[in-house]
Image: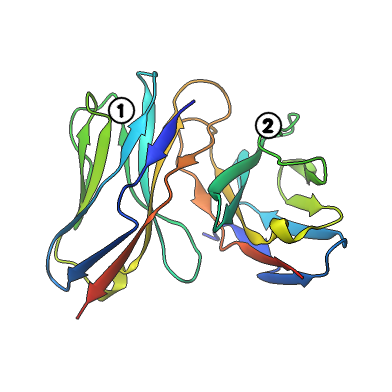
Amino acid sequence: GAGVSQSPSNKVTEKGKDVELRCDPISGHTALYWYRQSLGQGLEFLIYFQGNSAPDKSGLPSDRFSAERTGGSVSTLTIQRTQQEDSAVYLCASSLRPTTDTQYFGPGTRLTVL
Amino acid sequence: AQTVTQSQPEMSVQEAETVTLSCTYDTSESDYYLFWYKQPPSRQMILVIRQEAYKQQNATENRFSVNFQKAAKSFSLKISDSQLGDAAMYFCAYRSAWGSQGNLIFGKGTKLSVKP
């Protein structure tokens, strides 16, 4: 079946602009995660969604970051007023259930802030 | 808080040979999961192998096997008969079995090169 998909694959933006990154999880997966991969910080957890419940935002680095998940499926990560330090690869993952099941990753979105 | 350490930033292996990647972790929990993910230049994170902490038997997947030492908090990955396609970044990851979140905690990664 289809895996996790993300769009766009690459995004170049200017400092101060807002960006939206999209994640389409595997059909039927209730848990969805966003991670950030940067040279300095490695792989960091950002936010977690379980079904239609309120998300766990404990990993978001600042209030410029937000995310939503519509209909328990597609998720959008929004970064407002982008900064150069936001440049990274943003990875999305989904799993059938949150704790016991393997997370499957999408190909990521490489964000470059000029 | 849990941490994962990969002490080898880079490793190299000759094609058809065996290589072992190291991973140690720190946790006070007794029940958890450990993973090795592979990330080739395409960026796609691919699950290599998974180990449940309650299982004493080491997990194996074809040419990939782990040496899980729970008391030592060590989780190394052995790749046998290395192939050119094994060249990638390898990440060790930890996930708690408790709570409702289940996010992964990653090590910094090991870049594996395979020489023909």
x and y, in percent, of residue A107 in the image: 56, 63
**Label 1 Cα neighbours within 10 Å, binned few <14 / some 14-19 / many ≥20:** some
The three-letter amino acid code for the residue at tag 2 is Ser
- Residue beneath the point at 54% across and 58% down: A39
Label 2 vs label 1, nearer the camera: 2
Q: Is residue B1 left or right of residue A13?
A: left
* Residue B17 visible from this viewpoint: yes
Where B56 sits versus B51, above or below? Answer: above
Where B60 sits versus A90, above or below? Answer: above
Name the element at disc 2: loop
x and y, in percent, of residue B109 in the image: 40, 53
Q: Numbered disc 1: what chain?
A: B
- Picture disc at residue A58: 2
Q: Which residue is mark 1?
A: B53
* Residue B61 visible from this viewpoint: no
Disc tally is 2
- Residue beneath the point at 72% across and 51% down: A74
x and y, in percent, of residue B77 in the image: 24, 49
Name the element at disc 1: loop
- Residue beneath the point at 41% across and 42% down: B93
Where A45 sits versus B80, above or below? Answer: above
The quarter of the picture where the C terminus of chain B appears is bottom left
Distance (Cα) linking label 2 and label 1: 25 Å
Looking at the rendering, which quadrant does residue A114 occupy? bottom right
Q: Is residue B4 left or right of residue A23?
A: left
- Residue beneath the point at 73% across and 70% down: A11
Q: Numbered disc 2: what chain?
A: A
Looking at the rendering, which quadrant does residue A23 occupy? bottom right
In-front residue for pair B96/A100: B96
Q: Is residue B67 left or right of residue A55?
A: left
The furthest residue to the bottom = B116
**Label 2 Cα neighbours within 10 Å, binned few <14 / some 14-19 / many ≥20:** few
